[in-house]
Amino acid sequence: MAQFSYTGRDSKGERVNGVLNSEDRHALAKQLMSSGITPLDIAPIHAREKAISLSSNVFEERVAVLDVMMFNRQMYSLLKAGIPIMDALKGLQNFTQNKALSAVIADLYDSLNSGRELSSALQQHPKVFSHFYISMIRVGEKTGLLDKVFLHLFDHLEFEKLMHDQVKAALRYPMFVIIAMAMAMVVINLFVIPSFVKMFQGFGAELPFMTKVLLGSVDIW
């Protein structure tokens, strides 16, 4: 199957565009017509265009955990209110401020529009959705409790973020202590000990072994 970009108009006459996989232009045109979109232009995406698109994605925003949390919370609220999942995704795509997440939602919408399940569409974005996340969505699809699964995933991600922030905060103080100790050792070896070396050399007396080791460490620096 090849990848095509298309431009068309929906049932309300509004201009729409996107990218879909299809065997050829004719098959894609039939697919768009069946979904209520009148195609105006269908063009294949060549390998060079894909490479340019991938390279430009490097400079785009990234989808953070907080973005995924909000996506789950909003999906739960919309599905709980009885809004169809396609309408929910379309609405979130238009109102999401994070461009990277908006692009992901647009791809999910296109995948569902082409007949895929949501869990299968999520697998196309492993950097955004984990295996656990996808497995939970698959369970929600089979049990018909997708809205509750989105809420549980929100709680799960919130707990994970809380634990990560707490661990990071707990490690911050010991890290500062280690850095301060390392800086103190550098200052002692560079400025303090050399002054004692000259003083002990002037005495001409036999020094204890540990003192010799400490004074000898100056040569390392």
Image (cartoon, rainbow, N blue to C red):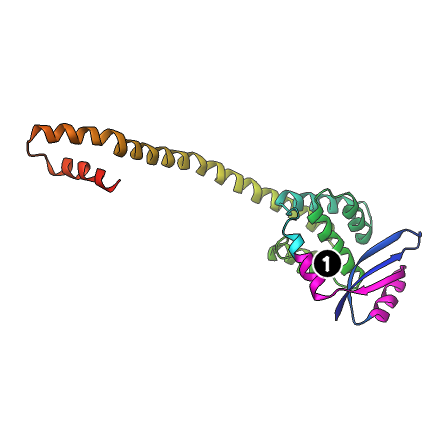
The front one of 121 and 1 is 1
Q: Quadrant of the C terminus?
A: top left
Q: Residue at x 72, y 51 (%)?
A: 103
| Magenta-colored segment: predominant secondary structure | helix
Identify whether 175 is placed above or below 123. above
Is 44 included in the stretch rendered in magenta? yes
Horizontal side of 193 relative to 34 (left or right) equals left
Provide residue 44's location: percent of width, then percent of height: 78, 66
Label 1 sits on what residue type?
Leu
Report the magenta residues as a range.
25-54
Is 205 included in the stretch rendered in magenta? no
Question: Crowding near pointer 1: few (<14 within 10 Å), some, many (20+)?
Answer: some
Provide residue 169's location: percent of width, then percent of height: 48, 36
Q: Which residue is mark 1?
A: 118
The front one of 32 and 84 is 32
Query: Can residue 80 be seen in this snapshot?
Result: no
Horizontal side of 72 relative to 164 (left or right) equals right
Q: Residue at x 24, y 29 (%)?
A: 192
